[in-house]
Amino acid sequence: MTLFKKYGIFALIGIVLTGAIVIAFAPPTHFIFGLAYQIKRLLALFLGAVYPLVIRLIEFTPLLVLVIGVLFTALLWVIWRGWRMRRYPLLILITALIGVNIVFFGTIQFLEVGRLTEPITLCEDYYATAQTGFQVIRYPIETRLRDDAQTFILLTTDGGVSWRQIFAAYAVNPQIIGCANIAAGFNEDDTWSVVIEVRRGDTFENDIIRYSTTDGGNTFERQTP
């Protein structure tokens, strides 16, 4: 009980931080994308110089998210402990290093991640049949040198009562607009295609990819260009 009273607040902080990091680096989901992106921007600001490395390592092993949460919590504990023990020179050094990292490196990463603007519904309630319909929602992202976007394609099979995300794609200066992402014949429930624009690695170019389904969106097959 004594340990819980002494360290419980840090355990709680660790859980909250880890949960936030999981949200930020999980596969993009339309319903929480705004929150996830803002968390990612804050992480870019505070991680600064090591942010690109962290991104690469998380792509290699998602378990690193837990490590980051623990390290953040440990840093807070060290600062708190130093304050309690009046180790002011150590606190000055730690806060100075954090400040330098944020000002000189974090700001650059923060700007590189970009500013998320209000989502745009490119294609609203596009119905192939009375039951099968689509929505295309795009989140514009203003970066330092370009205008990127995260696009989500949603599908309904019950006439709009419920929607589910079937594709998410990040693109550099995307060119597909309106309902051009959807290739569906009139009065066709099962067979249709989705065209998405996806950034090619770390380049400033996109790939145009077409996915087709013959079972109403349960499975998709990538088509040969």
Image: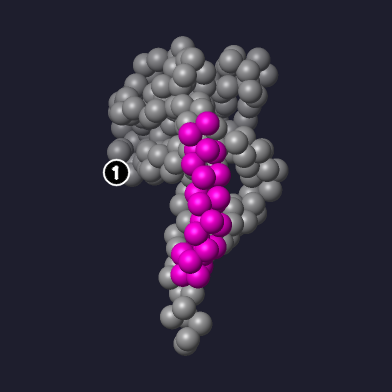
Residue 110 percent coordinates (x, y): 47, 32
Q: Which residue is mark 1?
A: 161
- Image: magenta residue range: 78-104
Viewer-closest of 89 and 183:
89
Q: Is residue 7 above or below residue 193?
A: below
Q: Residue at x 59, y 14 (%)?
A: 205
Q: Residue at x 52, y 63 (%)?
A: 87
In the displayed orientation, state which residue is furthest to the front: 89
Q: Which of the 4 image quadrants contains residue 32?
A: top left
Q: Is residue 91 above or below residue 166?
A: below
Q: Secondary structure at mark 1?
A: loop
- From the viewer's perspective, tell me whether residue 118 is left or right of residue 46: left
Q: Residue at x 51, y 45 (%)?
A: 96
Please state the total of marks drawn on the protein image: 1
Viewer-closest of 208 and 85:
85
Residue 119 percent coordinates (x, y): 33, 29
**Mainly helix, strand or loop, the magenta region?**
helix
Q: Counting other residues with Cα less than 10 Å from the Cα at mark 1, is it few (<14), some (14-19), or many (20 or more)? A: few
Q: Is residue 82 visible?
A: yes
Residue 17 percent coordinates (x, y): 47, 56
Q: Residue at x 44, y 17 (%)?
A: 147
Residue 219 percent coordinates (x, y): 57, 38
- From the viewer's perspective, tell me whether residue 84 is left or right of residue 49: left
Which quadrant of the figure contains the C terminus?
A: top right
> Identity of the amino acid at label 1?
Val
